Image: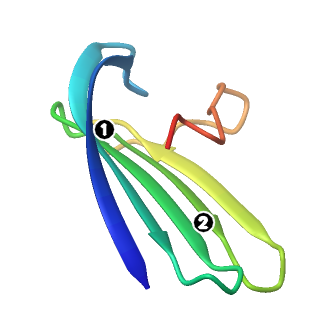
Amino acid sequence: MTGTRTPFSGEVAPCGKRGDGEHFLDDDGHGLLIRDQHFACGCRRMRHEYHDGSIHVSALRCDGRRVKETDQVDPDHGC
């Protein structure tokens, strides 16, 4: 797997605050793709694509609560 980290600034976190953080991208070149976004406030967005084509998208707020599925989670959050 190859992994990269890219800093970002001024993006809206799942808690609604604007902040800085890092994008993490791991790709095995055979269908596994992991995209995580970690905010300085502690929020996190995750998009994991697996070899079988399934995709798991989730987000956690800095207070530890999951973002509800009805809330908007950008699946390609800029990675």
Instruction: Return the disc, 1 or 2, that comes first in the chain's sequence.
Output: 1
Total tally of numbered discs in the picture: 2
Q: CA distance from mark 1 to mark 2?
A: 17 Å
Residue type, label 2 = His
- Look at mark 1 in the image and give the residue it sits on: 43
**Residue 8 picture location, percent across and down:** 28, 30
Q: In screen coordinates, is 7 left or right of 47?
A: left
**Residue 61 picture location, percent across and down:** 36, 36
Residue drawn 37% across and 25% down? 13
Screen quadrant of the N terminus: bottom left
Label 1 neighbourhood size at 10 Å, few (<14), some (14-19), many (20+)? many
Residue drawn 74% across and 64% down? 55
**Residue 44 picture location, percent across and down:** 36, 44
**Residue 59 picture location, percent across and down:** 49, 44
Question: Does 49 appear above or below 65?
Answer: below
Q: Residue furthest right?
A: 53
Among the 4 quarters of the image, the one containing residue 17: top left
Label drawn at residue 69: none
Name the foreground residue: 37 vs 27. 27
SS for callout 1: loop
Question: Does 8 appear above or below 22?
Answer: above
SS for callout 2: strand
Residue drawn 70% across and 78% down? 50
Residue type, label 1 = Cys
Q: In screen coordinates, is 75 left or right of 35?
A: right
Name the foreground residue: 60 vs 48. 48
- Look at mark 2 in the image and give the residue it sits on: 48
- Mark 1–mark 2 contact, CB under 8 Å? no
Label 2 neighbourhood size at 10 Å, few (<14), some (14-19), many (20+)? some
Work out whether residue 63 can be spotted.
Answer: no
Question: Does 11 appear above or below 55?
Answer: above
Foreground mark, 1 or 2?
2
